[in-house]
Image: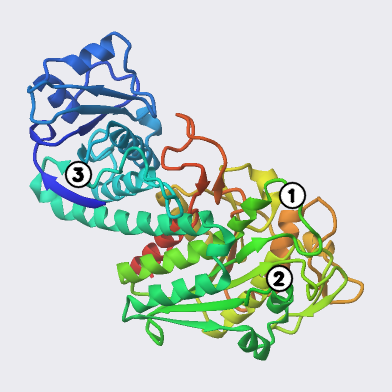
Amino acid sequence: MEINVISGAIQATEDELIVVNLFEGVEKPGGATGAVDKAMGGVIGEAIARGDFRGKQGEVAVFYPRGAIPAVRVLVVGLGPQDKFSLQGVREAAATAARKARELGVPSFSSIIHGAGAGGLELESAAQAAAEGTILGLYRYQELKNKPPDRPDPEQFTLVLLDEANLPAAEAGADVGQIVAEAACLARDLINRPANYATPSDLAELAMEIASQFGAMRCQVLDEEDAAELGMGSFLGVAQGSDEPAAFIVMEHNPGREDLDTVVLVGKAITFDTGGISLKPSEHLDRMRGDLGGGAAVLATMLAVGQLELPLHVVGLVPATENMPGGQAYKPGDVLTAMNGKTIEIISTDAEGRLILADALAYASRFEPKAVVDLATLTGACVIALGRGVAAGVFSTDEGLLARLQVASQASGERIWHMPLYDEYLDGLESLTADLANSGGDRFGGVGASAMFLKQFADNYPWAHLDIAGMTFEERPGTPKRPAHLQKGGTGFGVRLMVQLLRDWSTAG
């Protein structure tokens, strides 16, 4: 999609559709909406007065000016209560408008920047959120479908602001928003792709393609022989049951820059998870192609990092493998040795994500990072604790890193909730035959136990773990109460959060 930013009056904009807005409870439209209403003879105000439009979040109304203004159609989108409005509200309004534009079949549409006026939001951030919401709202997975959609997506979107002096800020925000949203859509594609189209080798090839676009980025793919030489017995133990070769992906933005802070992102990429010998139930097993959600988020974030040319040394680590119950598969009771020398008794082969992350976290220490953040669809326990599609759980050994993540969460709209790292969780991972077990063996405290397991491999650096199990796949159809920027399928959760974290870090140090 082409996104433009222009200065001018929205009521004088010539386009197939123009978009304005209204807060819930407003009885007389003002600002840009009021100007459009006045030019059309008060039809919007009449709809409000008669109760036909109330400005509720997700509510839309279409008006036809019939020559009163240059635009063919006017769309008014509800913003909800003004006292609750935020950048996430901008994304939702933009996504709602974009989907309605597609429904109307328009090739292009223009919009004011929601929240930049009466909403009181900073212009550049609001423009970024508007671009993000528009692109995310129009996303749909079409890669493997022969039949084109009934309604094509609009090809052009224009943000209109009144003051020409504000153009540079709005343009900067829109540019960042487009980069971030398109990266999130890449992560969505990876989660939605069938596992036979998203193997570890496929992810490695994509990582190489991403790195090749930027002079300041390089990619190295460690094969199983390389991993064995490094002593990654935990990663290779999971991989040994599959005929698909595993790949340990290492991406670096600004490699060798010792003058820059180093931040390492680690993403779990189980490209298909059967549960191994501890086989999962067959119901919804097809969704286990989404167990690469953390790895997808890291790959997509690295794409955005390269495009934004961030002044940081950013490392992306993606351990990628299937978890299969083959004849060579690891078994409950086996003991694996991780890269840092710790031995692990396997209680459940379905607790495999923490095993591949263990070696990735140990590998991360060689970069002497200022921070390491891992993202993983790790536990059903986190979904039980926080709900599906509500928030990701975050564990951290460093208050400063946690604070950075919380600030980035607020700005990006991708919610996280702080969870505890109590020592008692480690007690449940005691093993008869090894340094620790990979599972407590019962349903209690599973999310905390998994985080404490990972902590044993996150040495000598500030570390945070994001359990995104409840956030990477949206099962429910869209409703006015569900986020308009999401559809059924992969969400790309974590991309916006990580890019915001890194952008903030690069400016604040």
Task: Report, in whole angstroms, how far the alpha carbon at label 2 lies from the one at label 3.
Answer: 47 Å
Say left or right for 153 vs 74.
right
Residue at 57% over, 71% down:
200
Residue position marked by numbered label 3 in the rendering: 159
Task: Report, in whole angstroms, how far the alpha carbon at label 1 lies from the one at label 2.
Answer: 23 Å
Q: In terms of depth relative to the viewer, which is nearer, 417 or 498?
A: 498
Residue at 34% over, 80% down:
216
Residue position marked by numbered label 1 in the rendering: 282
Q: Report helix, strand or loop for mark 2.
A: helix
Residue 206: give x, y in percent of width and height.
Answer: 45, 71
Residues tagged 2 and 3 counted as in contact (Cβ below 8 A): no
Residue 118: give x, y in percent of width and height.
Answer: 25, 33
Say left or right for 370 vs 38.
right
Residue at 69% over, 74% down:
239
Which comes before the other along the chain, label 2 or label 3?
3
Tell me if I can see residue 467 in this picture: no
The quadrant in which the C terminus is found is bottom left
Quadrant of res 254? bottom left
Which tag is nearer the camera, tag 1 or tag 3? 1
Residue position marked by numbered label 2 in the rendering: 355
Quadrant of res 337? bottom right
Q: Residues within 10 Å of mark 3 (few under 14, many from 20)?
A: many
Which comes before the other along the chain, label 1 or label 3?
3
